[in-house]
Image (spheres, rainbow, N blue to C red):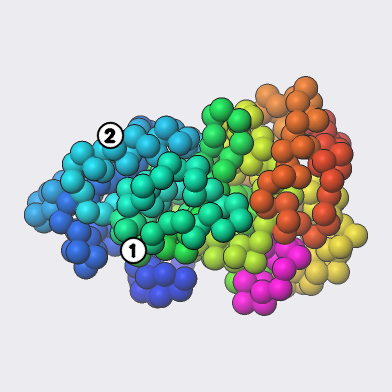
Amino acid sequence: MTDLKQFYANWNYPTNVRQGLGRISKLPQYCKELGMKAPLLMTDPGLVNLPIIINAHANCIEQGLRCEIFSEVVSNPTDKNVNEGAAAYHAGNHDGVIAFGGGSAIDAAKAIALLVGQEGALWEYEDVGSNWRKIDGDKMAPVIAVPTTSGTGSEVGRASVITDPVTHVKRIIFHPNMMPAIVILDAELTVGLPEKLTAATGMDAFSHALEAFCANYYHPMAEGIAIEAIRLIKLYLPRATVDGSDLEARAQVMVASTMGATAFQRGLGGMHALAHSLGALYNSHHGLLNAILMPYVLKANRDEIEERIARLARYLELDDPTFDGFLNWVVALREQLGIPHSLSAVDIDTEQAEKVGEMAVKDSCAGGNPIQFNASQYREIFVSAVEGNL
């Protein structure tokens, strides 16, 4: 096993990252570095009564911080969650946010930190046109992000994905200052994550890196980060899934997740365009949707990505370094991790196929796809994924 001391480090890309086993013990110190005296710790109902939250909260109190907890964040958070969190922030006279949990909790917390300093309603700041310029970035609350899963990479993102329950659309709230000021990457916090969630969140990280690698925008630095993130996923996600106590594997997958989200500055694509639509319609797990959709979208994009996927396959040292070899490896990896082959396995049918196609083509991620699919083509990909027709 690799010496785990190498996983204790600080770096400043794309923000201030404090990585290492046990780094959560420094949470009060990091709050004070940002001038926080009364942080609001935001998490979800599934974590709020677990030791990782109880201990972190107690540590903040013992170190003289007036720390309170807000845990009303659902999977696929809504504007209601954000509005309630902002109200709790103001009611408690807080001065900063600790975003503690998976992607949903961190996305909601970042949106709350933005909203508490603004006069308008949340949807006024949706990432459409130049809406982000309406935001007073100086009045946003500082954020410390503490991920407890390795998938979304929301801890290094400048945006939050929030569900509009009225229109059943996932909307993106964006501002450059939404990037958390400090990120704590402590792999020990992921040890209790169940096998199925480890697999699904890890495949979410894979989808970020893979779509960033395939995106039709020019960003060579992001491309380099993406391929190394995929290599780490290849080597360590199966290990982390089989043995949740494997701290080396957990640490490497956590880093790969952060890298994937850093890489998708280059863009995402059809996997996410469809996954966002399905998540809003069916409230399904985002990472699992990306994992199921992955080979179907890859196949649909083949004409534009075959050469670069073969290059990626060579970097990964696959036995068959071709597009087909890579696609077969993806399918085998999903099977190894217990990921279903079709969307029908997670109770999604084709009844809303037309709507899915229409929603996907309008999703902000669709612009990064190597081929600009129309609604009918997205519908066809979706139907194939439901039926398992690869």
Q: Name the residue under label 2.
A: 49
- Check disc 2 and report its element: helix, strand or loop: loop
User: Which residue extends farthest right?
Assistant: 303
Q: Identify the image quadrant of residue 26.
A: bottom left
Residue found at x 73% / y 56%: 367
Pick the front one: 205 or 273: 273
Taking 273 as reference, is 85 left or right? left
Q: What stretch is highlighted in magenta?
A: 210-223
Q: Which of 290 and 9 is in front in this view?
A: 290
Residue at the spot 83% in from the left edge and 49% down from the top edge: 373
Query: Measured along the vertical axis of the image, is residue 26 above or below residue 297?
Result: below
Residue 201 % position (x, y): 55, 47
Decide whether residue 212 is among the magenta residues: yes
Q: Residues within 10 Å of mark 1 (few under 14, many from 20)?
A: few
Per the picture, the main secondary structure of the magenta-coloured stretch is helix
Specify the quadrant of the image occupied by residue 352.
top right
Q: Is residue 381 in view?
A: no
The x, y position of residue 149, in whole percent, is 45, 49
> Which numbered dot is residue 138?
1
> Which residue is painted at 32% across and 58% down in the image?
139
Question: CB of mark 2 within 8 Å of CB of mark 1?
Answer: no
Inspect the magenta stretch and tell me whether residue 140 lies in it: no
